[in-house]
Image (cartoon, rainbow, N blue to C red):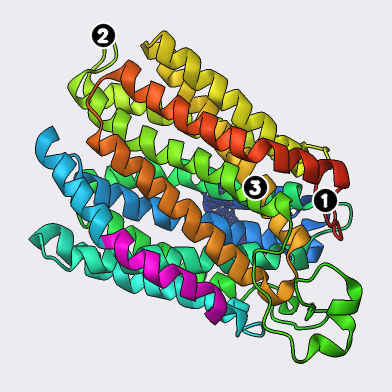
């Protein structure tokens, strides 16, 4: 019995040692955990700042970041399959085929997205969640197609594109409902877009690393990200689905027509009567989106054959892509603090700036000027798109706002495809290509500048803070 006894103080020493060991383990655990939890808290603090947390805009920013990360994973996988895996001549044919097969049906399907979503004013969160789930499942389909070379690649890519646009249309339509006090529409749109850009910048190298492991791994990553986005969609505040305060007015030019006895018998409003600010802003944005598609494909093939001085083709493409990304991020950041109350003037200015950059790059073609042009084009496109979104949110009644966003997104997507098609077909001559780009931009600017300036002078149909 004596041998079984524990000397006084021994148990205490053991417990103390165990406590010290446990405390050390917890300290190490906290140290390892901090980069993750600290980063998450920092992101949450940034996205929820200035009332965005209380209004629900912060959660939309986080959801859009998830959306951007998933989209870039799919982009990395498809780019490696369609573009980089074959010689230049064959790649041009494959890219043209990809655009034709995916975009031709999209032209027919996209205009239907808006009217369908107009009928779901109480299901916007479910619509965004459905778009996330659809892309998650299609990513699994693509993961098999990229390995086997199956023709399922094309319809699955089309489905991803349609689901992505459906999410984007609903997201744009709900921003006014989540506007914090003192926030402008341009600023709110900028915050949301910047969140997506930052997530894209983080996810792109991760996707490239997964691509190095295997062609299907970025698509597995996209699946996981979109599943998370599906659940995150339902964390948005309930007012996203509320019909309270929805505008059922017609797109008419006078109050009597809107609220008078003819209201019930009038036809459903069209989108051509929303004002010259919206229509000309859309035209200017179409020119910028055409430039984006043109530069994407023209420079991609040009730099594969004629890299920048002293650089490989991959490095040349990377430098141009980084310049465009930085310009886009800068444009979005500028939109976040811009105080101008005339988005029309912003559009006029940025188109003029990128037109000047295109003229200079065409006249003095060189590596530095090409990088500058892509940066300026990214900056201008981001700021002009934010301004166009603000015009749509300001001047289009909620009854048809979703349709307006769907149709505008369709036009912009088709402009990008048309620009890309021209870029694929153009001879690989830098000065000639950029001269064509400058001419198209000049046409877009000349045909819209007068209408935009007129809309700015009259103040549009402002009902909401725009900038």
Q: Quadrant of the C terminus?
A: top right
Disc 3 from disc 1: Cα separation: 33 Å
* Residue 62 sits in quarter: bottom right
Tell me where residue 364 appears, x and y as whole percent: 41, 8
Q: Residue at x 13, y 65 (%)?
A: 151
Q: Mark 1 — residue? A: 50
User: Quick one: label 2 or label 1, which is nearer the N terminus?
Assistant: 1
Q: Is residue 259 left or right of residue 390?
A: right
Front disc: 2 or 1: 2
Mark found first going from the N terminus, 2 or 3: 3
Q: Could you tell me which residue is drawn at 81 percent across and 64 percent down?
A: 54
| Direction from residue 430 to residue 12 in the image, left or right | right
- What secondary structure is found at the residue carrying circle 3? helix
The spot of residue 377 in percent (x, y) is: 51, 30
Q: Position of residue 118 (x, y in %)?
A: 61, 79
Q: Nearer the viewer, residue 301 or 152?
A: 301
Q: Which residue is mark 2?
A: 310
Residue 94 in sight here: yes
Nearer the observer: mark 2 or 3; the answer is 3
Q: Please, is residue 439 above or below residue 151 in the view?
A: above
| Residue pointed to by mark 3 | 280
Alpha-carbon neighbours of circle 1 within 10 Å: few (<14), some, or many (≥20)? some
Q: Secondary structure at mark 2?
A: loop
Up the image or down, 223 lies above or below 89; here it is: below
């Amino acid at each position: 019995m004596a041998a079984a006894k524990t000397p006084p103080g021994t148990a205490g020493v053991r417990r103390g040692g165990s406590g010290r060991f446990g405390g050390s383990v917890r300290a190490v655990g906290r140290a390892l955990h901090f980069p993750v939890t600290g980063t998450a808290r920092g992101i949450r603090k940034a996205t929820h700042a200035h009332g965005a947390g209380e209004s629900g805009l912060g959660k939309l920013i986080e959801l859009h970041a998830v959306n951007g990360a998933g989209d870039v994973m799919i982009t990395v996988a498809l780019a490696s399959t369609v573009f980089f895996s074959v010689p230049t001549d064959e790649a041009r044919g494959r890219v043209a085929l990809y655009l034709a097969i995916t975009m031709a049906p999209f032209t027919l399907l996209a205009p239907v997205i808006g009217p369908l979503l107009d009928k779901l004013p109480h299901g916007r969160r479910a619509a965004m969640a459905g778009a996330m789930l659809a892309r998650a499942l299609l990513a699994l389909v693509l993961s098999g197609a990229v390995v086997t070379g199956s023709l399922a690649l094309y319809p699955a890519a089309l489905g991803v594109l349609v689901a992505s646009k459906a999410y984007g249309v609903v997201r744009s339509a709900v921003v006014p409902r989540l506007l914090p006090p003192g926030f402008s529409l341009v600023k709110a749109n900028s915050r949301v877009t910047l969140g997506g850009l930052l997530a894209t910048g983080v996810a792109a190298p991760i996707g490239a690393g997964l691509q190095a492991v295997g062609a299907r791994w970025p698509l597995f990553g996209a699946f996981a990200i979109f599943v998370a986005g599906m659940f995150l969609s339902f964390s948005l505040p309930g007012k996203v689905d509320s019909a309270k305060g929805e505008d059922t007015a017609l797109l008419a030019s006078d109050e009597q027509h809107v609220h008078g006895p003819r209201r019930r018998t009038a036809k459903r409003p069209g989108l051509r009567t929303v004002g010259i600010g919206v229509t000309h802003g859309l035209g200017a944005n179409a020119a910028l989106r055409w430039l984006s598609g043109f530069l994407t494909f023209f420079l991609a093939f040009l730099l594969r054959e004629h890299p920048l001085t002293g650089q490989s083709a991959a490095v040349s493409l990377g430098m141009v892509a980084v310049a465009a990304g930085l310009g886009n991020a800068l444009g979005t950041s500028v939109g976040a603090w811009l105080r101008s109350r005339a988005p029309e003037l912003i559009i006029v200015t940025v188109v003029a700036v990128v037109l000047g950059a295109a003229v200079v790059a065409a006249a003095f073609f060189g590596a530095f000027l090409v990088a500058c042009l892509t940066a300026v084009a990214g900056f201008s496109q981001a700021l002009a798109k934010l301004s166009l979104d603000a015009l749509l949110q300001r001047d289009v009644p909620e009854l048809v706002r979703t349709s307006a966003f769907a149709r505008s997104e369709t036009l912009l997507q088709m402009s990008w495809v048309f620009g890309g098609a021209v870029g694929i077909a153009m001879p690989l001559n830098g000065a000639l290509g950029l001269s064509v780009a400058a001419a198209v931009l000049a046409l877009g600017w000349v045909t819209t500048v007068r209408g935009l300036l007129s809309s700015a002078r009259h103040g549009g149909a402002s009902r909401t803070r725009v900038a």
